Amino acid sequence: MEIRPLETTVGLEYFRQVRDGETSLTDKQLLELFRLLRKIEVHAEYPWNSGAFMRSAGWKEYAIAPFDALPCHRALMIEVQGREWVIERERDFEIQEIERKAQEEEKRIKMEAERKKKAADIKFLRDL
């Protein structure tokens, strides 16, 4: 297996910080951290799935906000794609979250109204 070096300064600095930190990592944990950093770098460089061999078009896993897979994830995305690109993805994510919460609230209100109507119908039938 050939290991390509990390290509971003943020990724390399984070890897060294974790590796040299006070907690000792096993070889397996160190390798997993390295692979995750490389995967994030690749997704940052090529964020869009496209082409004949891809199962579906769309954003790759680590190119989707929120950028919180690792503490350095957002900084790494900024280094590769730029601040404006990251802010745009985060804004889109926030809008989707607001819409999702609004739909959940609407569904909850509708279910509550149905429950109250059913209770009123049952009360009416009992009072007949």
Image: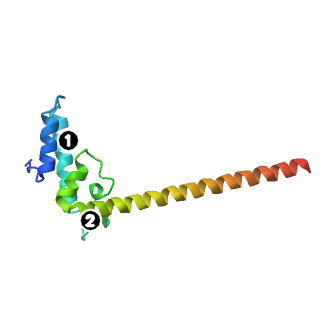
Amino acid type at circle 2 is Asn
* Side of 99 where 11 appears, left or right: left
Q: Position of residue 34 (x, y in %)?
A: 16, 44
Answer above or below: position of 111 versus 13: below
Dot 2 lies on which element? Answer: strand
> Which x, y percent locates residue 33?
19, 42
Q: Give, as a three-letter code, the residue at label 1.
A: Glu
State the residue lying farthest toward the right: 128
Question: Can you tell which mark lies on residue 108?
Answer: none
Q: Are marks 1 and 2 in contact (CB under 8 Å)?
A: no
Front residue of 83/12: it is 83
Q: Which one is nearer the viewer's eye here, 8 or 42?
A: 8
State the residue at coordinates (24%, 67%): 53
Q: Give the residue drawn at x 27%, y 54%.
A: 62
Q: Which mark sits nearer the N-terminus, 1 or 2?
A: 1
Secondary structure category for the residue under label 1 = helix
Q: CA distance from mark 1 to mark 2?
A: 23 Å
**Pointer 2: what residue?**
49
Instruction: Give the labeled residue for mark 1.
Output: 32
Q: Residue at x 44, y 57 (%)?
A: 97
Relative to 96, say whether 2 is above or below.
above
